[in-house]
Image: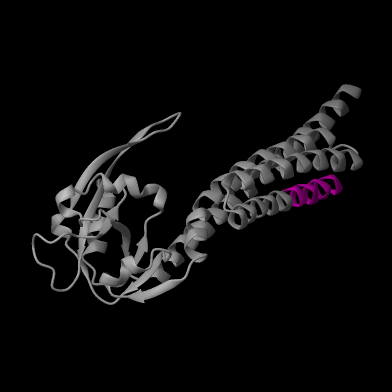
């Protein structure tokens, strides 16, 4: 029983350290704006965690090898989870680090440094949706997405006039198509400017005859409100942390059960061999 409690405390300590490492990696990514910085933090912290688990396990007498296994598993899992968790934080950092404005649709282009708008007017002409397939390069698995845009029209707009603001849908297929159409049918509420790195994906879907003479286009996510959009993004991130905590708890539990059982079987075999 004493051995089991010792292993339980050891697993809990390594598990807590792994969880803290995930949070630290995400925090570094959020503060620096670099996923690589967070990933590098996870690697350095994971190396320290592996060494610490091995040394502490050795000090406890019979946990050196088992501690090394758990520490290495925790390091790999924490580094990987920290990297994945940092990706959605980049969007949150982009939005929370900039001010929000309440404007009319015509005033959106007057605030190029603003990413969150609460709109007083305008509506999406969802029936005039335009789509374009775009292949996103990737070293392992390149994917094609059916990007879609729909014109956001100000009051008094007349057919034939250029459109500057467009609502976007990242993948206008399967379930996302219905979600985008439902969002576009909602009255004016909020608009979240698309990440500049993704603008080209949607620019290719807009025919030249629909663009204004200067070619300046603004692509936005049409949302109920900026606050609701941010809340949903934070909810996704916190959900990721919850799932990660559950998975890590299962891994630590399996380690505890497996090593305790292995030690018990080993002692039983030695006792039988002595008889």
Foreground pick, 135 / 17: 135
Q: Main secondary structure of the magenta part?
A: helix
Which residue is at a point 82% across and 42% down the rendered structure image?
52
Residue lying at the far left in this picture: please name it. Answer: 159
Is residue 18 magenta-colored? no
Is residue 8 magenta-colored? yes
Q: Would you identify the image quadrant in which residue 120 lies?
A: bottom left
Total numbered badges shown on the rendered structure:
0
Residue 61 place in picture, x, y as percent: 91, 39
Q: Which residues are magenta?
A: 1-14
Q: Left or right: where does residue 213 sit relative to residue 76?
A: left
Q: Is residue 191 visible?
A: yes
Residue 182 place in picture, x, y as percent: 23, 62
Residue 130 place in picture, x, y as percent: 18, 49
Foreground pick, 80 / 54: 80
Which residue is at a point 26% across and 63% down the rendered structure image?
183
128, above or below 248, in the image: below
Residue 83 place in picture, x, y as percent: 58, 45
Residue lying at the far front in this picture: please name it. Answer: 214
Q: Quadrant of the C terminus?
A: top right
Which residue is at a point 28% across and 56% down the rendered structure image?
217
Give the colour scheme of this rendering.
one colour
Q: Left or right: where does residue 165 sit relative to residue 267?
A: left
Q: Left or right: where does residue 105 sit relative to residue 72?
A: left
Foreground pick, 97 / 8: 97
Q: Left or right: where does residue 47 sit relative to residue 230?
A: right
Which residue is at a point 36% across and 76% down the rendered structure image?
102
Q: Is residue 250 visible?
A: no
95, above or below 119, in the image: above
């Amino acid at each position: 029983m004493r051995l089991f409690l010792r292993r339980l405390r050891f697993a809990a300590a390594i598990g807590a350290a792994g969880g803290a490492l995930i949070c630290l990696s995400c925090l570094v990514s959020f503060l620096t704006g670099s996923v690589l910085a967070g990933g590098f933090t996870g690697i350095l912290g994971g190396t320290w965690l592996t060494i610490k688990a091995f040394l502490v396990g050795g000090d406890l007498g019979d946990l050196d090898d088992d501690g090394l296994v758990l520490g290495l598993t925790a390091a790999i899992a924490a580094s990987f989870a920290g990297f994945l968790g940092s990706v959605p934080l980049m969007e949150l950092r982009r939005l929370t680090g900039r001010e929000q404005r309440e404007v009319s649709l015509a005033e959106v282009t007057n605030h190029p440094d603003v990413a969150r708008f609460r709109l007083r007017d305008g509506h999406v002409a969802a029936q005039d949706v335009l789509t374009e397939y775009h292949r996103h390069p990737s070293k392992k698995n390149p994917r094609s997405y059916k990007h879609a845009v729909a014109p956001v029209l100000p009051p008094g707009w007349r057919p034939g006039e250029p459109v500057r603001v467009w609502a976007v849908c990242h993948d206008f297929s399967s379930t996302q198509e219905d979600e985008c159409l439902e969002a576009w049918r909602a009255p004016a509420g909020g608009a979240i400017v698309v990440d500049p790195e993704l603008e080209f994906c949607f620019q290719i879907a807009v025919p030249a005859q629909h663009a204004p003479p200067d070619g300046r286009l603004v692509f936005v996510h049409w949302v109920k409100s900026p606050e609701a959009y941010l809340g949903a993004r934070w909810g996704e991130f916190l959900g990721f942390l919850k799932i990660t905590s559950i998975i890590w708890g299962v891994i630590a539990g399996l380690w505890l059960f497996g090593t305790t059982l292995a030690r018990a079987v080993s002692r039983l075999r030695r006792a039988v061999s002595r008889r």
